Image: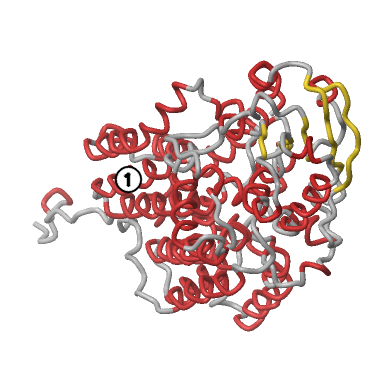
Amino acid sequence: MSDLGTATDRPHQPAPTSPQVGPPTPGPRALGPFLVAAITSVTLLLLAGRYGYHRDELYFLLAGRHLDWGYVDQGPLVPALARLLDTIAPGNLVVLRTPSALLAGGAVLLVAAIARELGAGRAAQTCTAVLAALSGIVLANGHLLSTTTIDLLVWLVAAWCAVRLLRTGDTRWALGIGLALGMGMLNKVLPALLAVGLIAGVAIAGPRRLLGDRWVLAAAAIAALLAAPNLIWQATHGFPQLGVAASIADGDSSYSGRLDALFLQFVIISPYAVPIWIAGLVALLRRPEWRAYRAMGWSWLVVVGVVLAAGGKGYYDAPLMLVLTAAGAVVTVAWASRGSVWLRRGLLAVGVPLFLLPSIVLLLPVLPAERLPGFVVDVNYDAGETIGWPAFADSLAAVHRGLPPEERSRAVILTGNYGEAGAVARYGPARGLPHAHSGHNSMVDFGRPPADADVVIAVGWERPEPLTAWFDACALGGRVDQRVEVDNDENGGPIYVCRGLRRPWAQIWDTEVRRTG
């Protein structure tokens, strides 16, 4: 009998198996992102005092004088912050913008930290930090006190916690997501959109067990509890933010409309970064070792789909695009480290001065305001809205001084938007200007003109209608002269003087101004 025996007599040998594929361990800690973040914040602080207030900042300061748990177009966080900063250092633009500069640096660190979670080495982390620091969403909003700056940090904190949760499986990280989203909804309701994206991403790509996890449910409860004051205010006032959102979808805002939103996807980070974040999206959805992170890729697809379908502003999903950029930087640095290394790295280096550095000129106040090229305002609408407000107030003061003394004492100013009303509140007292009123957004709730105010200086109205429906006569009293050649919403605009109030302000304000505002 043979000594070999049959196959069934042989000892059992386990069948070969493919190695388990799991998320990579985090990359090493790197100094580079901290240096890039520090340079970003310092640069923004050095430039914070140039040009002047943005129209939104003037509005926040005015809203801070009327603190509430909510407003027509935002939560209470930024108006409260604006009031605090202006109390600490009245009229100091650098102090007002300091939190934004610091938050921008924090955003740079968070994007690099997300890349580290994905396994990025030191070079990839630093590359990610540079891309984030020179991105449009960080530079533009890091220069101004803005709801978007806080929203950016909120989304990135939540995204970083989500990536850590997906990598480690430790669902206690969901509490960080809940805290970030809840605090963020005291600023804007947009973090709810991120929550929808994350839930949808997990439902599509898994792990679906997270949807019923006790820590995830606790995080949802925390977010709802923190957001409750603003949500209750919105509910008791008929959810006015829905009306604002509808007007944005109709194109009644800058950076709005579906075509604008689609176009902004390709420039809001940087044209240079487009192939990088697309590579990151593909890698998140297809790379086997990143299977745990697929929910993040799907989250962006869901969020951008909602933004485009609803006609929201194209920068709403930008924080998640930075997450894609972080993933893409890992892929790109690996690509540049193999094959024709010098050719690939040279190609990446050439793109920096061509695509990234111009962002500094376009998005930051580095050029003289009096010689600002028109193309800067064409690209960056907000740049024009930070120029000329003191001269705007001077133009109104000239019209006011031209009124007969008996009319001057009972005249008020009626503005077409909240920035103009905020400028009068900031610069008007030193020029002897009367109080300004407006029906724009929450300005309509800050008070209507007194009953005896039958003379109005109206600014921000391209045509005298509907002013002629409220007054017996409206005549051109002058024009706004901001003393610089800048194409913004105010420069060169008409200033009307209206007399003979036809109906009481109480009727006009509640039935017509609220609707037109």
User: Residue 469 falls in which quadrant of the image?
Assistant: top right
Residue 50: percent from the left, percent from the top?
66, 68
- Asked if 182 appears above or below 389 in the picture, the reply is above
Residue 15: percent from the left, percent from the top?
24, 53
Determine which residue is flagged by label 1: 179
- Asked if 263 appears above or below 19 in the picture, the reply is above
On screen, residue 266 versus residue 321, left or right, reads right
- Foreground of the two, 235 or 119: 235
- Foreground of the two, 127 or 191: 191
- Foreground of the two, 517 or 377: 517
Residue 93: percent from the left, percent from the top?
57, 63
- Asked if 256 appears above or below 118 in the picture, the reply is above
What element does badge 1 sit on? helix
Residue 183: percent from the left, percent from the top?
38, 44
Residue at image x 78%, y 31%? 455
Residue at image x 59%, y 62%? 143
**Which image quadrant: the N terminus?**
bottom left
On screen, residue 19 versus residue 517, left or right, reads left
Residue type beneath disc 1: Leu
**Which image quadrant: the C terminus?**
top right
Residue at image x 57%, y 67%? 131
